[in-house]
Amino acid sequence: MDDVLGKILAARDKRAVLRGEISKSGMASLSLNFNIPGYPKSDEKIHLCFQKVLSELKRHLLSHRILIDSSKEHCATDEAGDLFLVPILDGNCVIEEIKQITEKFEENHTLGRLLDVDITNAQGDPVSSGKAKTCYYCSEKPALLCMRQQNHSYTDIRKKINADIDKYLNELSREQICNDLAAKALKSLLHEVALSPKPGLVDRFSNGSHDDMDFATFLNSASVLSVYFKEIANYGFSFKHENLKEALPELRRIGLLMEEDMFRETKGVNTHKGAIFLLGFSLFVSAYLIAKQRFNYHSFVDLIQKLNGNLVERELGRKLYQTKQTHGEVCFEKYGNKGRGIRGEIQAGLPCVFENAIPVLERHLANVEADDKLLQKSLTHALLALIANNDDSNILFRKGVDVLDELKAKAQLAMDCFGEEDFENRYSDLINYCESNHISPGGSADLLAVSYFIYSLANYHS
């Protein structure tokens, strides 16, 4: 133990020498370290936490226009723990103001008194706030008093530190993951509508088979929906119940808000109703899965099916209200399983996505840095795979089974010769067929967005 204490004291002496060298050059210095009692002063988790806090501190300093000399920063782990030490460049703030700003950082941080940001002036003297710091453990008495009176055991203090660090790192992880999920959901909607040209669908250069919406309509709709994506991700990440069906009322509530905002923004035009349904469930399940384990396709399918159960029979097999039948109810009553639509697709675990679209995306994009041209190519191919295999209930309701089957056959012909000389003619024929017959495979467009979202997750979180 004497040997350990000697090493700790030697490490602190070395730190004093480093501070002295900075002051000899006529500069003030700033340092960050953790107040870790006992030994060891650092381990893998403490070091990771230190690096995260350091990043936050640097942003805090920069936001207050406090400049540091990054070329001369010292960041190391020794027997005294983790240390960051850096000279402060001359700026607008006097040294006492810098001390106050760093104190605010300590006071407002989740880890509070665990952090110790010290300021030394250009003469090598510590800059004190004159305030007695409270005890990290009890947050009531002065820290010096609790330490001298040994009011708290070493074991209890280390246990609290460990728990607080776990909580902090978990919160950071949740925030980062949910931000990423929300960004990927929005990205999937934007890439879908930007894909050009598309058969019967709105793209950058054409309204397809639509006279009530254009590219700007979709951009406006996606922007208002995006504010809900992180809310759904947060809900999925923090969901604790074993029975996923308990999440359905809250997911429906958020979904209804999204639909209301969409219709308000588009003045009554349905741009993303199917995407709201598909992406809402996919975001929730993905966040829930990532919070519990690594993301993978098999687990995603299993959870999406558990969440929805007998969705088709529950929502299409009987009338929920004594009102006019919905399009989905009409199709299911008239065409049976072929008319199950988006509900049937999600109840079955999104087979069009996993059996048709994602294999195409993997074939084009796996192990390749996707530029815009390659991404456009892969999404076009995936869209064809979806149209060729998806029993789009919107087309079924408006045009009937013969037109749906002919559309699927034309999409299959184009898909079969993808990358070959005859592809452009086949694809143009499909586009002309959709526009001349006013066909819009919007259900397949929604599935394309979800396919790209799920594929992107697998490449980042698996």
Image (spheres, rainbow, N blue to C red):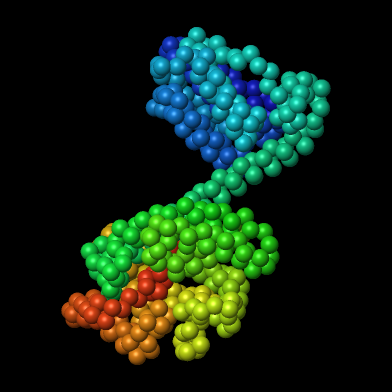
Residue at (80, 30) in percent of width and height: 152
| Closer to us: 311 or 161 | 311
Name the quadrant containing residue 167: top right
Residue at (68, 67) in percent of width and height: 243
Could you tell whether 429 is left or right of 281 in the image?
left
| Position in image of residue 287 (x %, y %) | 55, 59
Could you tell whether 97 is left or right of 207 in the image?
right
Name the quadrant containing residue 129: top right
Q: Is residue 301 above or below residue 407?
A: above
| Closer to us: 314 or 374 | 314
Q: Is residue 462 above or below residue 445?
A: above
Residue at (27, 59) in percent of width and height: 372
| Closer to us: 224 or 72 | 224
Q: Is residue 353 above or below residue 92?
A: below
| Position in image of residue 421 (x %, y %) | 17, 79
Could you tell whether 303 is left or right of 421 in the image?
right
Q: Quadrant of the N terminus?
A: top right
| Position in image of residue 234 (x %, y %) | 56, 54
Instruction: Give the number of callouts.
Output: 0
Q: Is residue 286 visible?
A: no
| Position in image of residue 299 (x %, y %) | 56, 69
Q: Is residue 246 visible?
A: yes
Residue at (53, 39) in percent of width and height: 52
Q: Is residue 356 above or below residue 291?
A: below
| Residue found at the far front of this picture | 323
